[in-house]
Image (spheres, helix red, strand yellow):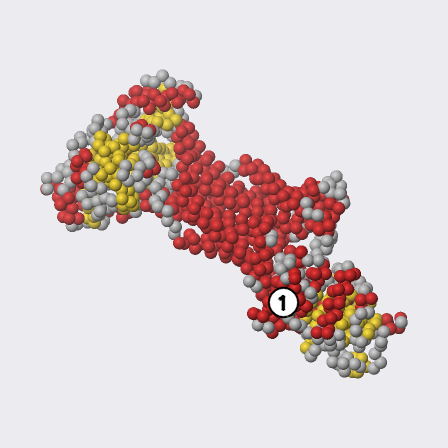
């Protein structure tokens, strides 16, 4: 694992050199998430800082309970940090209303869930169309939406399954529909939470290959995985343990001091 | 069609069971409201048409020996005369061989100008005005005997002579009692036809009665007497013989008010049904939101705003509304008219017409109630964040209530599946409370209806409880009184016969309001009321009366006090317990037949003979009835004005009185059924949702060896628990609700004493068992047939 050599002063304290110099697509600075329940405080994320390079395949790796999904939720605006910030390009997510976050997500982020989360009563094509309707079509006029949806499904190799319901598709096919849905509004970034966690190994390879190929189309793909081997396929990655970054590659991440001493 | 619209439709079509229950709830509510409103409007319009209005009610009748139509204009120009109507009338009979007693009584009327009748006109509904040898029948005559235009009617023109008239049209006459109610047909002929048919008729006791009358409408009824006298003077001056002057009883709105009151009561219950429908929808939407939490989270993750998601679900609600409301309105209108015909068979309903407000109201309710019911849960439900939506979903957290855990530990003899069922009752507190509320209201409504009908039934029984006769004979007039009484007394099984008088529905107007009038022989042994204070009549009493407790309370009269009626001073000598069921009355006066004769209201009283038998067995009394009936022979059941049986057993009389309320009971129970139906749907909906949410739990139970019946038992216990709690609450709420309803009934329709029918609780208990069983077993069994692997798969 590489470790940062220099730091620079920012309003959030000392940051590794390179965080600002590499023009990352996503910048995470001193992110923390603490949950308080019945008088007890649980730190899910503890002072996490890193950047995601543009057009990269970026992995967030860690065992169960390491805070990967929580971190992912921060990146997508699904959850709000207790402290710190997330910057997308030049735009800080900041404090926005739920509706504002929803609108932002529709245009800027394509989310792929571990359990697909397709609407069971809509066909593959309609699931992708739904994303276009909700995300305002990514700048395309309404009459072009259908074609766009078909193109997205063709991209993931499902042009022959447009009118199938999710229940009529295999797990891998459903995940591909989910990927197509995430691509529908042409977002700059795709975020996948354990995209292959629910698939067999052969299907996983296929789906992962599809995801990885999207970086060649100018997308930045961030994926969460507990699988080290899968994480190793990324161009850049961070490793989480107990809510802290304990390792990174190409992410200009701040490694947690305690973890660093352990090493 | 866009994807969101497709999803809204799919949410309706994919969950057929839920859709069915919601649509049925809306359908039942709208159907009930439409039927009640349409039936009420139809009946009310028919009744008001039948009873006429004050404008169609003559103030004076002047009987003459002949009509001189040329005098109409000069009479109409007289002071205080508003309208003049010359009419010739024949009280005859319509011979129909297949009819009971060989035919029906019939009144045939003629006016100088049939198309311009001044006071009581008729509207031609089909056909044309009659010429010589022709007749136009009243529309309702078709309920007495099936007859069509082109057919002929045979009428008596003398004791042994008849004539045939061809039917050329049908008409409706406002203010005319229904032929079925009055047992008298009505027909209209031209003046020439009347002369040709009845010109030679000599009125006698057994043949047709021909009369000529001039009906007057006056401007100032206070001067009607002087006006009538002035008219009579003019007629005499023109060599017209004046045979008599009569003043009809003023137009009475009491019955219309009572009919309106009945439907107001029903509307109150129907509104309950609509409210319950709204609660059913509320429950359904809450369940829908719970089911679709993750989908909502997905849509928000994809960029959907709260508003766009909310609108999608509102489209589903709109679809539910359309599916439930439109058929409810159509069926309500289709059923309303025949229902009115069945319930009020004694009035002529007229042609089928729908007032726009009925449809508009049902449409408004059918669309607005579901929308309002769905709005709040949707607004709250779509507030969920993406993170909350993707939080753990499925098996309940297992926290459980400490109280139930403690109880299950102490009562280990109760099976775990039963405890699972009991714990499930308040697993979703909001939904459980809503379901309980729905069922409680349904149970309370049933109890209310049962109480209202029990109270009314008891009142009817009380009315006749004071009279200990076996047979009642209605007499047309007093001319045959003594002869008939002697003849009946001579029958072997007759113990005693007494004459009596009964209100014909006109009543007696006092300074406090209208009262019913009952007359008996002073030495009566048949009429034995409970005397609350004072005493019964004696032969030495002059103008003495007893009053019932209701009149005593309304008037404040006490024993020994007097009241002035029709220039007669009446002395109250006693207060008795005597219920009456006449609507619009403030009480009853019980007195001797002689006093009634002195009051001058004898013309408005029904003269009757009360017969007590030695042998009161059914067979013996039936024989006695036949013997008495034989005394009245010749013509349709006794000659002119007959056409109905005038001999009743006591039971027949009670049944006839109760029959008048069957309509009321039928309507009440119909609405109770509607309310109960919606309540049941609410329970079924809640249990179906519970089964759906606990599919994984079912899967685990079955994977551990639980049979389908064992699984079903859990939900049956849950359903039974909800039903039992609501039974208790329904009784708690229902008793005061029933009391309030009976009080409202007293204000709007008829005062009865509040009486709780204990059998209602047993019926409610049985209903709860049946409904809970059906509502829970079916969805639970269906769920238990799903593959275990499918149930356990994490979605």
Where does residue A55 sit, x and y in percent of width and height?
73, 75
How dense is the environment of label 1, judged by Cα within 10 Å: few (below 14), some, or many (20 and up)?
A: many
Give the quadrant of residue B488: top left
At a point 62% along the width and 57% down the height, the residue shown is A121
Residue B736 appears in view: no
How many marks on residues?
1
Front in this rendered view, residue A233 or B400 = A233
At a point 40% along the width and 22% down the height, the residue shown is B621
At a point 42% along the width and 21% down the height, the residue shown is B619
Name the side, left or right, on which B60 lies relative to A208. left
Name the side, left or right, on which B180 lies relative to B381. left
Front in this rendered view, residue B156 or B45 = B156
Where does residue B516 sit, x and y in percent of width and height?
35, 37
Extreme-top residue of the structure: B492
Where does residue B769 sit, x and y in percent of width and height?
61, 39
Name the side, left or right, on which A154 lies relative to A228. left
Q: Mark 1 points at which residue?
A: A149
Question: Which element carries disc 1, helix, strand or loop?
Answer: helix
Name the side, left or right, on which A76 lies relative to B123. right
Give the quadrant of residue B106: top left
């Amino acid at each position: 694992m590489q470790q940062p050599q220099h730091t620079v002063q920012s309003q959030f304290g000392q940051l590794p050199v390179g965080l600002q110099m590499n023009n990352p697509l996503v910048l995470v600075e001193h992110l923390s998430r603490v949950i308080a329940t019945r008088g007890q405080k649980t730190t899910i994320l503890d002072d996490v800082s890193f950047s995601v390079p543009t057009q990269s395949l970026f992995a967030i790796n860690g065992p169960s309970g390491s805070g990967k999904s929580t971190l992912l939720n921060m990146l997508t605006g699904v959850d709000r940090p207790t402290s710190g910030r997330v910057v997308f390009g030049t735009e800080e997510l900041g404090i926005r209303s739920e509706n504002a976050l929803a609108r932002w997500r529709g245009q800027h982020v394509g989310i792929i869930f571990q359990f697909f989360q397709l609407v069971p009563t809509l066909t593959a094509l309609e699931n992708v169309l739904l994303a276009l309707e909700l995300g305002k079509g990514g700048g395309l006029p309404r009459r072009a939406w259908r074609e766009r949806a078909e193109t997205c499904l063709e991209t993931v190799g499902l042009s022959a399954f447009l009118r199938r319901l999710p229940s009529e598709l295999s797990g891998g096919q459903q995940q591909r529909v989910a990927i197509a849905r995430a691509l529908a509004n042409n977002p700059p970034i795709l975020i996948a939470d354990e995209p292959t966690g629910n698939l067999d190994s052969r299907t996983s390879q296929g789906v992962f290959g599809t995801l990885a190929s999207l970086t060649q189309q100018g997308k930045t793909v961030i994926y969460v995985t507990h699988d080290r081997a899968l994480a190793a396929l990324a161009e850049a990655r961070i490793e989480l343990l107990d809510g802290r970054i304990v390792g990174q590659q190409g992410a200009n991440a701040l490694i947690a001091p305690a973890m660093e001493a352990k090493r | 069609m866009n994807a969101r619209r497709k999803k809204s439709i799919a949410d309706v079509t994919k969950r057929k069971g839920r859709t069915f229950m919601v649509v049925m709830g809306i359908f039942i509510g709208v159907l009930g409201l439409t039927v009640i409103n349409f039936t009420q409007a139809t009946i009310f319009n028919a009744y008001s048409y039948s009873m006429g209005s004050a404008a169609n009610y003559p103030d004076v009748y002047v009987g003459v020996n002949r009509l001189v139509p040329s005098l109409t204009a000069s009479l109409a120009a007289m002071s205080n005369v508003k309208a003049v109507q010359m009419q010739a009338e024949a009280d005859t009979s319509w011979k129909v061989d297949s009819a009971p007693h060989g035919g029906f009584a019939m009144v045939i009327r003629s006016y100088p100008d049939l198309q311009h009748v001044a006071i009581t006109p008729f509207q031609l509904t089909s056909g044309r005005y009659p010429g010589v040898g022709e007749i136009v029948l009243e529309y309702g005559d078709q309920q007495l005997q099936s007859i069509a235009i082109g057919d002929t009617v045979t009428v008596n023109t003398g004791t042994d002579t008849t004539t045939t008239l061809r039917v050329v049209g049908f008409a409706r006459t406002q203010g005319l009692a229904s032929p079925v109610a009055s047992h008298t047909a009505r027909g209209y002929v031209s003046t020439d036809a009347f002369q040709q048919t009845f010109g030679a008729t000599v009125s006698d006791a057994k043949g047709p009665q021909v009369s000529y009358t001039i009906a007057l409408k006056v401007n100032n009824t206070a001067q009607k007497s002087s006006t009538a006298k002035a008219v009579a003077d003019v007629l005499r001056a023109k060599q017209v013989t004046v045979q008599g002057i009569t003043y009809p009883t003023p137009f009475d709105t009491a019955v219309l008010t009572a009919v309106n009151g009945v439907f107001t009561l029903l509307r109150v219950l129907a509104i309950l049904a609509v409210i319950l429908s709204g609660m059913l929808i509320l429950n359904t939407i809450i369940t829908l939101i719970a089911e679709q939490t993750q989908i909502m989270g997905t849509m928000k993750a994809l960029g959907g705003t709260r508003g766009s998601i909310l609108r999608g679900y509102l489209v589903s609600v709109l679809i539910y509304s359309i599916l439930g409301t439109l058929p409810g309105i159509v069926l309500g209108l289709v059923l309303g008219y025949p229902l009115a015909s069945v319930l009020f068979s004694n009035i002529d309903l007229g042609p089928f017409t729908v007032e726009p407000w009925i449809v508009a109201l049902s449409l408004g309710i059918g669309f607005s109630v579901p929308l309002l019911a769905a709005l709040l849960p949707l607004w709250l439900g779509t507030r969920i964040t993406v993170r909350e939506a993707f939080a753990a979903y499925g098996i309940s957290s297992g926290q459980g209530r400490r109280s139930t855990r403690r109880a299950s530990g102490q009562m280990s003899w109760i099976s775990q599946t039963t405890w699972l069922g009991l714990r499930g009752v308040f697993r979703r507190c909001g939904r459980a409370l809503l379901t309980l509320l729905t069922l409680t209201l349904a149970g309370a409504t049933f109890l209310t209806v049962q109480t209202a009908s029990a109270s009314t039934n008891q009142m009817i029984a009380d009315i006749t409880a004071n009279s200990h006769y076996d047979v009642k004979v209605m007499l047309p007039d007093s001319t045959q009184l003594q002869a008939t009484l002697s003849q009946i007394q001579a029958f072997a099984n007759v113990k005693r016969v007494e004459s009596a008088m009964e209100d014909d529905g006109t009543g007696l107007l006092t300074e406090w309001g209208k009262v019913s009038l009952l007359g008996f022989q002073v030495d009566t042994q048949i009429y034995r009321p409970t005397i609350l204070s004072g005493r019964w009549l004696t032969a030495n009493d002059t103008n003495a009366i007893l009053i019932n407790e209701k009149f005593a309370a309304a008037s404040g009269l006490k024993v020994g006090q007097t009241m002035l009626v029709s220039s007669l001073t009446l002395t109250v000598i006693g207060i008795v317990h005597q219920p009456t069921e006449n609507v619009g009355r403030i009480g009853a006066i019980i007195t001797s037949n002689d006093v009634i004769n002195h009051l001058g209201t004898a013309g408005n009283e029904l003269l009757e003979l009360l017969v007590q038998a030695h042998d009161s067995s059914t067979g013996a009394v039936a024989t006695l009835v036949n013997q008495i009936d034989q005394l009245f022979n010749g013509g349709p059941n006794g000659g002119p004005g007959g056409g109905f049986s005038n001999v009743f057993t006591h039971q027949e009389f009670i049944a006839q009185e109760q029959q008048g309320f069957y309509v009321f009971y039928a309507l009440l129970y119909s609405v109770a059924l509607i309310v109960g139906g919606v309540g049941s749907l609410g329970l079924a909906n809640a249990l179906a949702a519970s089964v759906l949410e606990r599919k994984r739990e079912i899967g685990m139970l079955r994977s551990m060896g639980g049979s389908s019946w064992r699984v079903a038992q859990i939900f049956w216990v849950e359903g039974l628990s909800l039903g039992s709690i609501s039974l208790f609450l329904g009784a708690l709420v229902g008793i005061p609700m029933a009391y309030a309803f009976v009080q409202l009934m007293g204000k709007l329709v008829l005062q009865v004493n509040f009486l709780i029918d204990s059998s209602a609780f047993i019926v409610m208990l049985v209903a709860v068992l049946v409904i809970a069983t059906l509502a829970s077993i079916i969805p639970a069994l269906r769920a238990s047939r799903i593959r275990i692997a499918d149930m356990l798969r994490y979605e």
